[in-house]
Amino acid sequence: MNSAGAARIDRLMTALRRRLFSSLLAEAAARMITLMLLLFLAVWLFYVTGFSPVEARFVFWPLAVLSIAYLAGKYFWIPAMRFSSDREIARLAEEREPRLRDRLLSSVELRSVLESEHEPHFSLSMAAAGLDQLTESLEKISVSSVIGLESLRRAWLMALASVLLTILASWTYSTSVKTTLAGLFGDGALASYYSGSVNFIAGDIRLLYRYPAYTGLPDMELSGGTGDIEAYPGTIVEVSVRSFEECDEGRMVMKSGQEIVLDRKDAHNFTGSFTLLDDDRYRFEFDGEADGRDHAITVKKDRPPAVMVDYPASELEEVKESDIIELSWRMEDDFGLTEAALIINYDDGSKRIDQRIELPAPPDTPKSHAAKWLWDLNSFVFQPGDRVIYRIEAADNDTVSGPKTGSSPPYYL
């Protein structure tokens, strides 16, 4: 059965629920601001008395998470469960507003009876008339008088006091406050810079290695490191760095005298690149001021190929000029093999000479390769009784420094 009183109750309960949860949300926000700022000020005081802000973050962040969980439970989960029904909200309203006692809860229950599908043991028309009579004066009651703002007002006054206290500390002790902030967010270099313990003016160094094509290596990005550079020769190194202060110009200054002007992305961030060829050291300079650290540049060595002769595995003490010897060998390299050759040292009748015989090249520059070759001694003029020295030599695919060669141990005929 429709009733004017039921409509009034619906409007009142909707307004009470909206006001209740919005006030809880606002109070939770104020409490959160207060707790976070007080936690920060506590860490700052610990730093002022000698503790490290970088280590303090392991206390600050767990406490911050616990505070958030506590406020979420107190102002969201528990109210959501407690005030899920109009009856609970009506009870709360009657506790806070004496004029509602024995009227609002009765009105909510009468409305439930009128909306029920079950036939009651009393007259519905009389219940509707009673509900209308109970709710006539409810419209004159202000929702704000029921959901008071005193608790919310106190919460925001505490938040305002915390904000003013933090501003005062930041204004009076700006260096230590900035050090604490940098430490809480894990930037130890920036915290050290603000504290004045080291002359750091550069941080957040990121390196991108673009290796030479012959290596077959993918690009590699490094961040959060010391800024030391180590890569193969010919690698293009892209550097990005952040200046702790606003700057107009940045550069990398090498110990060898080379200087690389960095591109300015904004007042703090700079980028640059160079091709790695030799060992060196470098440091950053911003607006003519040098960073207090220097960084190593190390060229990684591209190893020469390794060669092993499998057969003959030992010295052949006596051979004939008409013999054909089957040579079997293996080669390995860190990036790729391109050539193989047989190097022979023997007496040509007047002096000892070296002769180079090209062997079949490994296909597709593999990193490892095994092969065989028939050595026809009849194709050479060896002196009777001569001791022939031979070895297998291989070359790699280094296109930057030039191919490097590796050789097997010497063997004898």
Image: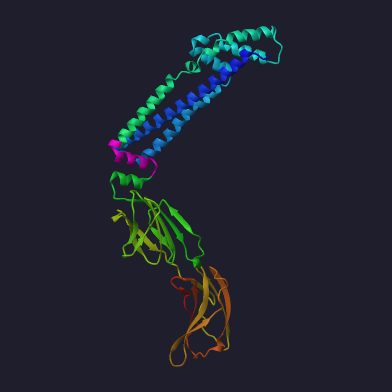
Q: Could you tell me if residue 45 is visible in this image? A: no
The image quadrant where one finds the N terminus is: top right
Give whichever of 385, 402 is nearer the camera. Answer: 402
Q: 396 or 18: nearer the eye?
A: 18
Image x and y of residue 117, in percent = 70, 16
Residues rendered magenta in the picture? 171-186
Could you say where residue 323 lies in the image, as x and y percent from the top left? 58, 86
Q: Position of residue 367 (x, y in %)?
A: 53, 68
- Relative to 296, say whether 12 is above or below: above
- Residue 220 visible in the snapshot: yes
Residue 124 figure quarter? top right
- Left or right of 290? Residue 123 is right
Q: Main secondary structure of the magenta part?
A: helix
Say if the magenta span includes residue 355. Answer: no
Residue 181, magenta (yes or no): yes
Residue lying farthest to the right in this orientation = 119
> As drawn, which residue projects farthest toward the bottom?
350
Residue drawn at x 33%, y 44% is 191
Q: Quadrant of residue 180?
A: top left
- Up the image or down, 134 lies above or below 144; here it is above
Give the vertical position of 333 relative to 292 (above or below). below
Query: Which is nearer the eye, 326 or 137?
Result: 137
Here the colouring is rainbow
